[in-house]
Image (spheres, rainbow, N blue to C red):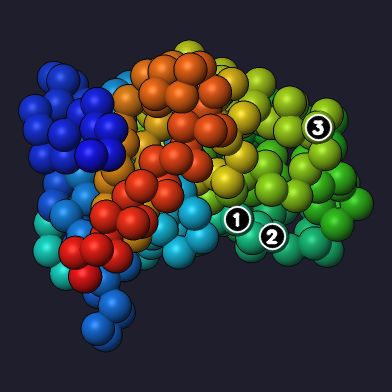
Amino acid sequence: MPADATAPGGPAPHGDALRAEGLVRRYGDRVALDDVALRAAPGEVVALLGPNGAGKTTLLSLLAGLQQPDAGHVGLSPRQVGWVPQQAALYRRLTVRENLALFARLDGIADADARVERMLAEADLADRADDRVGALSGGGQQRVNIAIGLLADPPVVLLDEPSSSLDPRQRERMWRFLAGLARAGRAVVYATHDVGEAERYADRVVVLVAGRVAFSGTPAALAATAAGDLLRAFVDLVEATSTDAEATS
């Protein structure tokens, strides 16, 4: 039976920043998510792990309000969620400041100029504020992408494969930034294929297999099922859960 440190739909601690229950999403006859529950506490970093097609991006899109579930409930409005897609929607010919100011106006953020300056400082972009975004490294562009998602000062930040195109140095700098967001009390939820990244940075991992939660708990708890080897534990869980799903289909 798949490991399950936190049963989907079970009681969550008081004061969760994010809580979703019973999420179902279908595309025609295909069920992309089936009775998925997810919670994240203030200051918690949660990694969504799973093979391709497991439903990670679909889950994030429901949490961000980009799609509506066919069943279930998300306990936040989209205005309370900062969404950072894998592909940054940036205007390369505009400066960093101009990009932030444009998205602040589009989002109807009060006192947009002050908010832009604050995000430039928080994202360590003040010294590049007047540079065109196209001149930045991949890591710099990703920090602009994250800063845009934070303009409305949301309590929850959702990121889809945030480090997929970054080199090790850029990745480390980005994670220092995200760790700072968590220390400031934001819940950070991100999808990744990198098991090592989940082990290093996440307080909790949620493993999705075939649209269902196969495990939710600490990286150490999952690794303990394979003598401390998180990658081996993850692969074993995916294979066992996939076999169970095929046997019952």
Residue closer to the observer: 16 or 246: 246
User: Which quarter of the rendering shows the C terminus?
Assistant: bottom left
Using a 10 Å C-alpha cutoff, classify the residue at mark 2 as few (fewer than 14 neighbours), some (14 to 19) or many (20 or more). some
Residue 196, image quadrant: top right
Q: Earlier in the sequence, mark 3 or mark 2?
A: 2
Question: Which of the 4 image quarters holds residue 58?
Answer: bottom left
State which quarter of the image contains the N terminus: top left
List the residue tagged with mark 1.
Answer: 86
Residue 216 x, y percent position in the rendering: 30, 32
Please, what is the three-letter code of the amino acid marked with disc 3? Answer: Pro
Dot in front, 3 or 2: 3
Amino acid of disc 1: Gln
Q: Where is residue 173 drawn, in percent x and y?
A: 74, 26
Mark-to-mark CA distance, 1 and 2: 12 Å
Viewer-side label of 1, 2: 1
Q: Is residue 145 left or right of residue 207?
A: right
- Indicate which disc residue 90 carries: 2
Look at the numbered disc 1 and give the secondary structure of its residue: loop
Real-space CA distance between mark 3 and mark 2, rounded to the nearest whole angstrom: 23 Å
Q: From the image, tell me which residue sits under label 3.
A: 168
Looking at the rendered structure, the secondary structure element under dot 3 is helix
The residue positioned 71% from the left and 53% from the top of the image is 98
Residue drawn at point x = 75 percent, y = 50 percent: 165
Residue 114 placement (x, y as % from top left): 57, 34
